[in-house]
Image (tube, helix red, strand yellow):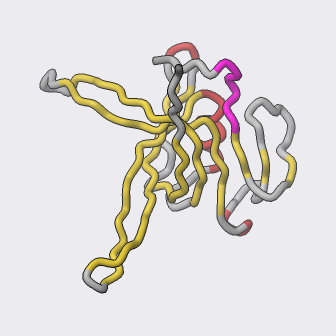
């Protein structure tokens, strides 16, 4: 029996996407995403913010770099990935990221500078059509990731 690894987040970008071009022309974009929840503690309303590391690959990364900016509200579907690396002192570190499989820009039409309510599949090569929301899907149909 196989497991399920599915994450759904709605939050605001903490900064503009950082875009890198790897060997072989593979594009990767990453940014922090803030989600918040409120609760009552001792009769006072408390807001708790959680930060998530979001990673997008290939065509999805290219589209994110064009349309997403710090502060934008976005709906993201993806999966959790934990990876390790060595820091400068050769200490092994671990980081958990959400690898986005698609995203939808949320908010008012006036919040978007280009094609405000647009649905786009990254496999499309024509101008996106106007719709209720702006949904981006990965261009790589096989879902393979270069790690």
Number of dots carrying numbers: 0
| Residue 38: quadrant of the picture | bottom left
Front-most of residues 117 and 77: 77
What residue lies at 64% left-to-right and 40% top-to-bottom?
102
What residue lies at 43% left-to-right and 64% top-to-bottom?
36
Relative placement, left or right, of 5 versus 93 is: right
Front-most of residues 109 and 102: 102
What residue lies at 36% left-to-right and 71% top-to-bottom?
47
**Magenta part, dominant SS:** loop
Q: Where is residue 14 in the image (x, y as percent from the top left)?
A: 44, 55
- Residue extending farthest to the front is 1
- Residue extending farthest to the left is 89
Q: Where is residue 57 in the image (x, y as percent from the top left)?
A: 56, 30
Q: Is residue 1 above or below residue 126?
A: above
Q: Is residue 103 above or below residue 123?
A: below
Q: Position of residue 15 (x, y in %)?
A: 45, 53
- Residue extending farthest to the bottom is 43
Q: Is residue 43 magenta?
A: no
Q: Is residue 138 magenta?
A: yes
Front-most of residues 135 and 43: 43
Magenta part of the protein: which range? 137-142
Relative placement, left or right, of 16 versus 40 is: right
What residue lies at 45% left-to-right and 18% top-to-bottom?
147
Q: Where is residue 21 in the image (x, y as percent from the top left)?
A: 52, 25
């Amino acid at each position: 029996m196989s497991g399920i690894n599915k994450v759904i987040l709605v939050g605001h970008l903490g900064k503009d996407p950082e875009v890198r071009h790897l060997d072989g022309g593979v594009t990767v974009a990453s940014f922090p995403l803030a989600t918040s929840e409120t609760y009552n503690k001792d009769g006072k309303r408390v807001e708790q913010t959680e930060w998530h590391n979001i990673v997008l690959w290939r065509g999805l990364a290219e589209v994110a770099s064009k349309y997403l900016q710090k502060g934008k509200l976005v709906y993201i579907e993806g999966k959790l990935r934990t990876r390790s690396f060595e820091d400068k002192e050769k200490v092994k570190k671990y980081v958990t990221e959400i690898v986005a499989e698609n995203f939808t820009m949320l908010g008012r039409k006036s919040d978007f500078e280009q094609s405000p309510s647009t649905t786009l599949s990254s496999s499309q090569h024509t101008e996106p059509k106007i719709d209720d929301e702006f949904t981006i899907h990965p261009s790589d149909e096989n879902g393979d990731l270069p790690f």
